Image (cartoon, helix red, strand yellow):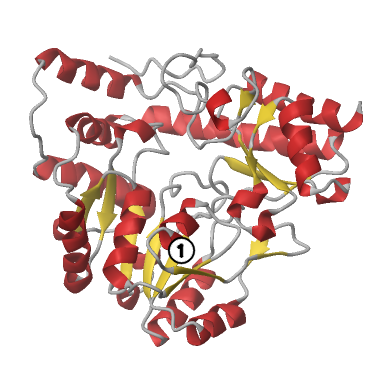
Amino acid sequence: MSERNLDFDKIIDRKNTRSLKYDFAVKRGMPENVLPLWVADMDFETSSYIQDALTERVKHGIFGYSEVQSPYFEIVRDWLKRHHDWDIQEKWLVKTPGVVFALAMAVKAYTQYGDGVLLQLPVYYPFSEVIRDNGRKVVSNDLYLDNDNRYHIDFVDFEQKIIDENIKLFFLCSPHNPVGRVWTEAELIRLGDICLKHGVTVVSDEIHQDFVFHRKHHVFANLKKEFENISITCTSPSKTFNLASMMMSNIFIPNPELRLKFKKQLDASGTSQLGVMGLIACETAYSKGEEWYNSMLAYVSENIRFTKKYVAENLPDVTMTDTEGTYLVWLDFRKTGLTVDELENLIIHKANLWLDSGKIFGKCGEGFQRINVACPRSILKEALERIRKALYK
């Protein structure tokens, strides 16, 4: 048996499949036939090995409480060792029904009501939501866009915010969504040293760790033994293998005290075992999905290159920031002179596209749009053509 799902040019009709991306446009205030390139799932069939494994499990017909045993951990460990040179221990592993859920549990476990939690805007908007919704305060060390067309960290401001706001918890997004940065070893060590100095716990969302182009992803907890002791590392096969609805993530917490506090919040939330289909999908993805993953990654990399070339040649008032990681491209429309509302109207009603507006990632995201390029190239080209026509016809 060989991998069957390697045609990434294939257009698959996802309508009427309960797809958040395709079936909820009107409910979310969008035109009915809008072309969606917003939410971060892929328009590709997952590995046929995963499909087959799930089909076989369905045939069994009984879906009682399920849990994993040692082979599951060994498969996850092997993936992380091969791809990220990270040696993990089984006792570190805590499974959750998603990374955002884990972020919320960390807020509850490591801060008190009214505390500030540090992040780096513009950033994945659920970061801010789980902080505010749990009665904590969002504190941002805003990233800045430099002349090299990449975002950077203001380390002086980072440390000052920790001091001024008495920060005890920092959300790190690595690789960064939406700006596409893959943080260097030096950048991460500098962040980590500051956090060590001030007793800050680091929740590192590394869900996009398998989408890195021309750079190396560094697991934050793996850079120094001391970082391991202050880290909660969030991973999942959901982005890598397009398994978001399987609702499972692997969270690694080496420090026993931090792990106990986290688990207590899991217990308080009423979660226990995860769904059997998610566990099977994860195990199969990491053990048999390598060919699909490599082929998909090459295709997405080419889509990023295609987008950069198209923007440079056809959209003179738009700039694409360099995408070092993720399959999410960050487009800067500020040179168009459009207000935030005018840009929204152009994208939604003139181009008939559903992208993620930069404003939802924080005020410093205003004037930007995030576009998901993990789709057949013909769809991507159509979306970019619509932007061109809306701007310049």
Q: Position of residue 93 (x, y in %)?
A: 20, 55
Of the pair 70 and 197, the residue shown nearer to us: 197
The residue carrying mark 1 is: 172
- Camera-side residue: 104 or 376? 104
At 38% from the left and 15% from the top, the residue drawn is 4
Q: Is residue 308 visible?
A: yes
Q: Is residue 124 left or right of residue 102?
A: right
| Residue 222 location (% of width, % of height) | 34, 66
For the N terminus, which image quadrant? top left
Question: What quarter of the picture does the C terminus occupy?
Answer: top right
Quadrant of res 203: bottom left
Helix, strand, or loop for circle 1?
strand
Is residue 277 left or right of 26 when viewed as pictured? left
Q: Local crowd at mark 1 within 10 Å, few (<14), some, or many (≥20)?
A: many
Left or right: residue 7 versus residue 71 is right
Q: Is residue 329 above or below residue 246?
A: below
Image coordinates of residue 106 in percent, x first then y, are: 31, 63
Q: Amino acid at mark 1?
A: Leu
* Residue positioned 50% across, 37% down in the render: 40
**Residue under the image location 30 percent in, 38 percent down:** 247
Q: Please say whether residue 25 is visible from this viewpoint.
A: no
Q: Across the whole image, how many numbered discs are drawn on residues? A: 1
Vertical side of 308 occupied by 84: above or below = below
